[in-house]
Amino acid sequence: MADTLTLTLDTGDVTIKLRPDLAPGHVERITTLANEGFYDGVVFHRVIAGFMAQGGDPTGTGMSGSKLPDLKAEFSREPHKRGICSMARTNQPHTANSQFFICLDDATFLDGQYTVWGEVTSGMDHVDALPKGEPPRTPGKIVKATVG
C-alpha cells in the first residue's frame, strides 16, 4: 500500500502521510477513490478559519459521498491537531464514506469520535490558503489526488 496521498489543490500541492496503522479501512477507501479519480475537481465546501477544511463530496454540498458503502468507524487515540486528516460523517459513527477534513488548528474535542487516516507532511500553507466559508463564495478545489 502506498504511504502518501498528494492533493494538488488550486492553491498548491499538499502531501499527506497515510496512516493504515490507525485506520486501514479508511486508508484503503481514500486510496481507492483517489486512484479512480473520484476526488479530481472536488471542492472544499466547508472551510472554517481556526478549525478545519472539509471536502470529498462530489456534489460540493456536504450531503453526498461515493457509491461505495459507508465505513465502520476506526477511532483511535491519535489527537486531532493541526494537519491531521480525518473522516467526516453524520452524527452516527459508522457513516464515513468519501468526505474528509484537514485540521487547520488543534481540535482535540474531536478525539476518539472521528477516524484519523493521515497527516499533512508538507503544503499546510496551501490548505491554510483555501477560501473560507460554509460554503466559500469561490471554493478551493482538488485539481488532482495522487497516491504514491
Image (cartoon, rainbow, N blue to C red):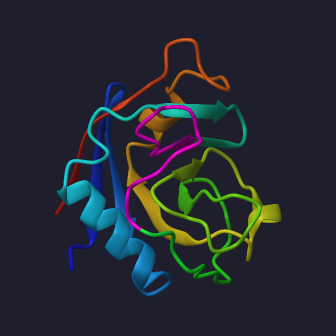
143 or 103: which is nearer to us? 143
Does 117 sit above or below residue 75?
above
Queried whether the magenta region covers residue 26, the answer comes back as: no
Does 103 sit above or below residue 29?
above
- Farthest top residue? 137
Q: Residue at x 67, y 26 (%)?
A: 134
The stretch of residues the image draws in magenta is 54-68
- Where residue 17 appears, as percent x and y from the top left, is 36, 66
Queried whether the magenta region covers residue 62, the answer comes back as: yes
Q: Residue at x 44, y 25 (%)?
A: 140
Quarter of the picture holding the N terminus = bottom left
- Where residue 71 appears, as percent x and y from the top left, is 51, 74
Q: Residue at x 44, y 73 (%)?
A: 26
Q: Residue at x 56, y 62 (%)?
A: 86
1 or 84: which is nearer to us? 1
- Where residue 55 appears, as percent x and y from the top left, is 49, 42
- Farthest bottom residue? 21
